[in-house]
Image: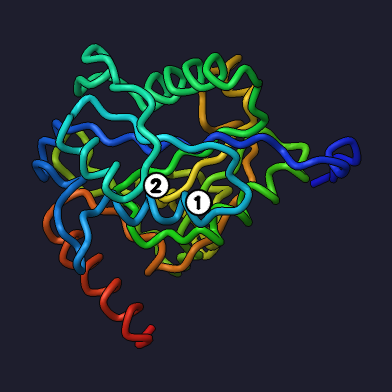
Amino acid sequence: MKNKPDNSDRRPLVLAVIPARGGSKRLPRKNIMDIDGHPMIAYSIMAAQQATRVTDWVVSSEDEEILDVARRYGATTPFKRPEHLATDEVRNIDVVLHALEYMEKEKNQKYDIIVLLQPTAPIRKSSHIDDAIERLWRSDLSSLAGVKGPFQKRDPILKRIDKNGNLVAYCNDPELDPREPFYIYNAALYAVKRDYFVREKRFVSERQIPYVMDRYHSTDVDELADLIVAGTYLEMIRKGEI
C-alpha cells in the first residue's frame, strides 16, 4: 500500500451520511429504539459530532419522527429524503448519492471522501471514523471497510444448504487453506473516495483497506437479539467493565 504524497499538504473534505429509514421490517422503528438510555441513532450522531476529521455530516430520512429525534441530538438534517428513496428496494448507494449531490450544491464544494455510518452500529466510536479517514486518505486504494475478525477455525465454519437440502461447504476451492483467518464486514463503517464512488456507484473496490474492529464495536443491530446484546455492551462500556 503506497502513500500519496500529493495528499500530505491538506486535509480532505469529508462528508459523513447517516441513513435512517423509517420502514424497517425485521425490527420496526429500530433506528429510534432505546438502547442504554438513548435512541439507537443517537450513538451514530454523537460519533459523527465528535469526529474531528469529518467536514460535514447529515442524517438522511423520510420519517419526521426520526428527523425530530435526530435534531434533538444536534444532527444536521438539511433535507427530508424523497419517498422514492425510502423503499425496501432502494440501496444505500442511492441514498448517499442523493445526500452528496445535495450537500455539494449547498456547500458549493466537492468532497474528497464519503463515509457511511449506519445507525445500526451504535458502538462504533468517533476515533474509528477519524482513523479510517486518515488511513484512506493516505492510501492509493479507493475504499475502506470495517470488518470483524480474525476468525480462524481448522474446519471452515461457513456453510451453505444446497438444492437437495444438504449442508455443504460454502467454498470448495482446494487452494483455500481452511486454517487461513477470515474477516466479515461489520456494517459499522465504510469510507470511499468521492470520485470512485460517483463513477462506480459502489462503496467497495476490488482491493480495500481493512479496518479491523473488535466484536464489541462491530455490533450490528438487525433483530431483537442484537438490540439486547448492544444494550449490554453499551452498559458495560459505560461502567468501564469492557
Q: Position of 204 compared to 230: left or right?
A: right
| Element at label 1 | strand
Mark 1: amino acid: Gly
- Residue 154 occupies which quadrant of the picture? bottom left
Mark 2: amino acid: Ala
The picture places residue 62, in percent across and down from the top left corner, at: 22, 24
Q: Which mark is residue 84?
A: none
Question: Vertical placement of 142 versus 124: above or below?
Answer: above
The picture places residue 193, in percent across and down from the top left corner, at: 64, 31
> How crowded is the residue under tag 1: few (<14 C-alpha within 10 Å), some, or many (20+)?
many
Residue at position x 38%, y 26% in the image? 78
Rendered-image quadrant of the C terminus: bottom left
The picture places residue 46, in percent across and down from the top left corner, at: 40, 55
| Element at label 2 | strand
Residue at position x 67%, y 33% in the image? 142
Mark earlier in primary sequence (2, 1) = 1
Question: Vertical placement of 150 versus 96: above or below?
Answer: below
Is residue 7 or residue 170 the one in the foreground? 7
Q: Position of 47 compared to 114: left or right?
A: left
- Residue 71 occupies which quadrant of the picture? top left
Residue at position x 11%, y 56% in the image? 224
Q: Which residue is mark 1?
A: 146
Is residue 202 or residue 38 the one in the foreground? 38
Q: Which residue is mark 2?
A: 187
Is residue 139 or residue 10 the one in the foreground? 10
Question: Vertical placement of 108 versus 165: above or below?
Answer: above
Q: Is the C-beta separation of discs 2 and 1 under 8 Å?
A: yes
> How crowded is the residue under tag 2: few (<14 C-alpha within 10 Å), some, or many (20+)?
many
Q: Position of 94 compared to 134: left or right?
A: left
Question: Spatial distance from mark 2 to mark 1, Cα to Cα?
Answer: 7 Å
The picture places residue 182, in percent across and down from the top left corner, at: 50, 57
